[in-house]
Image: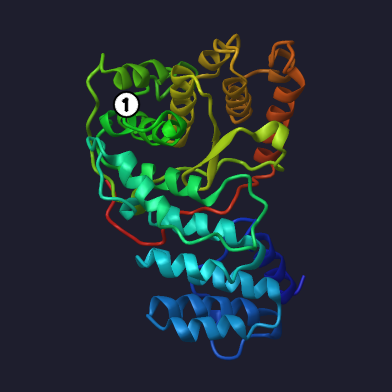
Amino acid sequence: MSLGSGLWLAILAGCGAGSQAPTEPMPVICDGTPPPEAESLCAVQAAAALTRADKLEDAQATCDALPSATWRGECHFQISEALADTGHLDQALASCADTGQYARMCEGHALWMMSETLVDATPSSADADAQIEALVAKLPPPPEAASGSAWDVSDIARSAAWHGIYAGSGSADPTAARGASAERRKYAISAFAWEATRLLDAGGLDAPEARALLAPQVIAIWEGTTPAPHGSIQAQPCWDAPMMPRPDMDAEIWLPSIRTYPGNTRFYDEDLHTDLTIAAIEGAWAHGKPAAAKALLELQDSPSVALQKTLARQLALMPDQVAAVEDVYPKTGSDDAVLRKVFKKTRKALEKNRAGRSVVSNAKGECK
């Protein structure tokens, strides 16, 4: 395979819908006069560099000069991410209008990358929900072009802002999250559970088969029967979480769900305790503290389809813990076919190492 064709395959896998496109300079390829096959890739990187150097008009002109609509879209996507990473939300969102079919995904990335600074609230702020809704009200109208995503940009903004309140704050005080309205509570619960599971001790970390289910502790913290844990503070560049393997999207299988950091999704349930359980399971996985397969299997009798789908996905991610899981999971029932699809599609994506495009900030910082 020639260098050029390899580059094309790499970047097309990363354009908008695939894995993260290159953001670091490639001096050997882009230094001087790049080969024809690399010209568009190098132009994209140059546009991102110009944006970070506060030369936005030059960056936009570089993108607009590209002959391919796909490359122009990717180029403006990279401009938007660079703007978000340097603290320019309005300009980042405006740039997304030029990304073509990935406009909605682009807006989501910009919001997630600025998650920490979207609102001025803390876990103890009783008015956090009001602050977030004020942010949502000021979002620009969505561009006509969209990626076909099931998630509205206002909902992504809610997820990102709530995450920014809790993630790395060093506090799992439920005050802010408990103040969210019933219809928006799922976004707050995701963020609260993320930080709670980060700060809680999962137990048995050296023996994966003995890891505890953190959901009961998370529920107790929410209800105030257990003191909220406190710990180290982490700035956004230090929010570390893996990308969930991403199977082909299927509305019947993957909804209802909401977006979560760093480009993942989670199922949700309108029942408070069930949703806290789901968010705790997902949060523990994100922090490398997944509950043992045995603990997850004990939840199989729950009537919640969202929880059952969560279990199917989580069990698919631990092939070493569940022997012949296809023969024992899920139990025969009305949703058996759907759960098997969730399990098998997730396992297949895991085996292929297929993930989405991360929304992690490129900024660097000292992490504890």
Q: Residue at x 64, y 56 (%)?
A: 18
- Percent x, y of residue 356: 60, 50
Q: How is the image coloured?
A: rainbow
- Percent x, y of residue 66: 65, 82
Quarter of the image that includes the C terminus = top left
Residue matched to label 1: 200
Is 36 situated above or below 196? below
Q: Nearer the viewer, residue 38 or 75?
A: 75
Q: Nearer the viewer, residue 278 or 352?
A: 278
User: Is residue 12 found left or right of 54 in the rendered image?
Assistant: right
Other-residue count near label 1 (Cα within 10 Å), few / some / many at <14 / 14–19 / ≥20: some
User: Is residue 293 found left or right of 128 in the rendered image?
Assistant: right
User: Which quadrant of the structure image shows residue 224?
Assistant: top left
- Percent x, y of residue 258: 54, 38
Q: Is residue 339 visible?
A: yes
Is 354 situated above or below 142? above
User: Which quadrant of the structure image shows residue 91?
Assistant: bottom left
User: Is residue 14 found left or right of 177 in the rendered image?
Assistant: right
- Percent x, y of residue 349: 68, 40
Quarter of the image that includes the N terminus = bottom right
